[in-house]
Amino acid sequence: MAEKITLGKALNHGLRRALENDPKVVIMGEDVGKLGGVFRITDGLQKDFGEDRVIDTPLAEAGIVGTAVGLAIRGYRPVCEIQFDGFVFPAYNQIVAQVAKMFYRSKGKVRVPMVIRIPFGGGIGAVEHHSESPEAYFAHTPGLKVVTCSNPADAYTMIQQAIASDDPVVFFEPKRRYWEKGDVDLDAPLSGAYPLHAARVARPGSDATLLAYGPMVRVALDAAAAAAEDGRDLEVIDLRTLSPVDFPTIFESVKRTGRAVVVHEAPGNLGMGAELAAKITEECFYSLEAPVLRVTGYDIPYPAARSEEEYLPDLDRLLDAVDRSFGW
Amino acid sequence: MAKGERKAGAVPPSGGGTDAPAGGFVQLLTPDGEHLGSVTTADGTTYSVDFTDEEYRGLYRDLVTVRRLDAEATALQRQGELGLWASLLGQEAAQVGSGRALRPQDMAFPTYREHGVLYCRGIDPIMPFGLFRGVDQGGWDANEHKFNSYTIVIGSQTLHATGYAMGVTMDGKTGSPDGEAVIAYFGDGATSQGEVNESFVWSGVFNAPIVFFCQNNQYAISEPLERQTRIPLYNRAAGYGFPGIRIDGNDVLASYAVTRAALDNARNGQGPTLIEAYTYRMGAHTSSDDPTRYRIASEVESWKAKDPIARVKAFLTKQKLAGDDFFAEVDEGAKQLALSLRERVLAMPDPQPVTMFDHVYPNGSPELDEQRQAFTEYHASFEGSGH
Ligand SMILES: Cc1ncc(C[n+]2csc(CCOP(=O)(O)OP(=O)(O)O)c2C)c(N)n1
């Protein structure tokens, strides 16, 4: 039966179900136990599953991920929580040099099935290092799978799928959407769920394709609703998976609409949007009515909170890009 | 002893024999081949070994064999057959002693120099040659042999070992003599890395069944020990709440006895130990290094006098446990093994290029499948064209 819950609560339920279903799943991170994480995503889990399953760790990100590698080699399925996007870098070495390569290095003999959860993105008025979008660093690394959810229903299933997967998964959580509610069927079996590595058409349309993921899906949907009032029928694709990108779904859409606008919070330079634009150009060149346009964060360090409304792509900037696309 | 009862902090070694560093170290076999029987450290722990004659001879055979394999690898590198080699010359006792101290159920996490430990784990000694020749990146089965992949980024493996050890505890495999223990190898330079310090913190906090085995070979490429630390490395353990002990790293018996005891403590639930094996890297850091730029010949000479193999030979001779026939036979066996290894290395085929797309993801990736396909077709397009 579907319930209306927040994205944060949906993640909590998903983690709970993973802990219930597989005794090898362990959660580890700073403050994940008694406190339930700074965003309360692991709320109540240590109480119910014990300190060996939900492990409060010392304050060291390389340690969290590095020991998780050892646990995974031992046969566990660790789910690491990195407290905020900007704090993943001390663990960066472990993630890109070890987690991503164990399987390759060992010719497939050593698996490290683990999930690294990272609340990411801005819009919550935080101080430095609490609002970044580092997804491209990870999507650029072969050996890692990178996904992000945008709504409670996806949050609930995708976190479980990520944990069940033998691939190491970097799981980006749109922190500004933690409190948004949506319908979630808590009893739905995972086996029949929408695939983890597939994009989803969040809103069908015929005039142009908006490509978004994580926190920007809401912005794209709002933009499509506003454009509809002007008589433009925009399709919104929620990428969901950043590595691998589900290109067939994207190509099908762009070939049909002839226009594509990508939106993300991360700086544009060498970001996901650059990759998407290049691939779409390669594959859909003869169908395009306009170049693929990007609406992104600027190429600056994430600014102070009082400026973030200007930094973050919003409805107006996105609609402006749509206008430009149609003006071509 | 129950958890927590064990005294944490540095365990000043007993003093040690000839040429011990300030603060001493545990030594059971002197450079002259004198067997000290047993040593008691300041905390009252007594270390000894009780080998049969055959076992003493076996240790000697191990030492000679790994040195010979290492020499063969160095030669192969010079002849252009290996891209690089990280030699263990001088560190045989530290590796064979600790490697033989491992019980079958114990898990080891090496760096890139632990060919002697690899040999002790019963892995085909050809395995690291693939890595250094460039035909693969290792590729042995870590779980089958209880010996993880070589780790080249300095220090990272100490965290893997710690996590694995936490898993041992979670599996209920500690607290008894047949429990499991874990050993992590690293160098003196590695002790400066944040990740090694994190692994000490973690292991202490979680009372992990782990032995940290630091081979202090005095240099991290060109940087001498003084560039890493102002105190003896084994003293660092005290700051993390577990014992540290220094051994004569060129003494295979001390290496065995202390590692065996530390592993047993770990498997019995008494938590981590840091062992500093005080030794010396006799050769270059790797085959691309020129050690004459940063160390003097007399220093190397002084360490030659402490050779880990010569002293075992002296002991076996003095005790009449072995004679010339035995030594010749060991040399010949090692030589034959090295020669067959050479043949096998030379015959190592280059991998089929398309296999570079294998094993990126357990569940595969559509993007990669496409690239593999394109790669295959591209190469096929040259067939018969004389390319
Ligand atoms: C993180 C990192 N930095 C630098 C290097 C290059 N490097 C390879 S070995 C080495 C020295 C390591 O010294 P030590 O830990 O004492 O081990 P040893 O080689 O002496 O056994 C360095 C700097 C590396 N492999 N990893």
Image (cartoon, coloured by chain):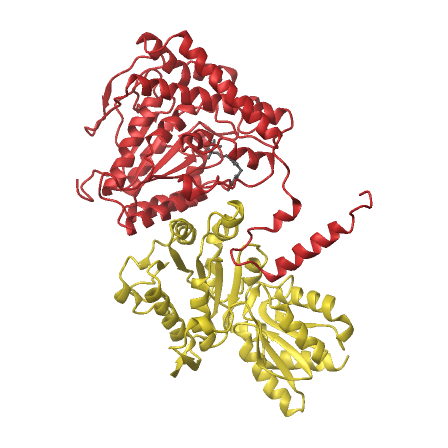
Q: Nearer the viewer, residue A276 or A301?
A: A276
- The percent coordinates of residue B29 (x first, y second) are 32, 17
Q: Is residue B63 left or right of residue B351?
A: left
Which quadrant of the figure has residue B341? top right
Q: Residue furthest front?
A: B384
- A219 vs B220: above or below: below
- The percent coordinates of residue A142 (x first, y second) are 57, 54
Q: Residue at the spot x=51%, y=55% of the render?
A: B362
- The percent coordinates of residue B30 (x first, y second) are 33, 15
Q: Which chain is red?
A: B
Q: Residue at the spot x=46%, y=53% of the render?
A: A91
- B284 vs B33: above or below: below
Q: Which chain is yellow?
A: A
Q: Does the image show residue B295? A: no
- A274 vs B110: above or below: below
Q: Is residue B240 left or right of residue B139?
A: left
Q: Nearer the viewer, residue A244 or A152?
A: A244
Q: Residue furthest right?
A: B385
Quadrant of the frame with the C terminus of chain A: bottom right
Which quadrant of the figure has residue A256? bottom right
- The percent coordinates of residue B303 (x first, y second) are 44, 17
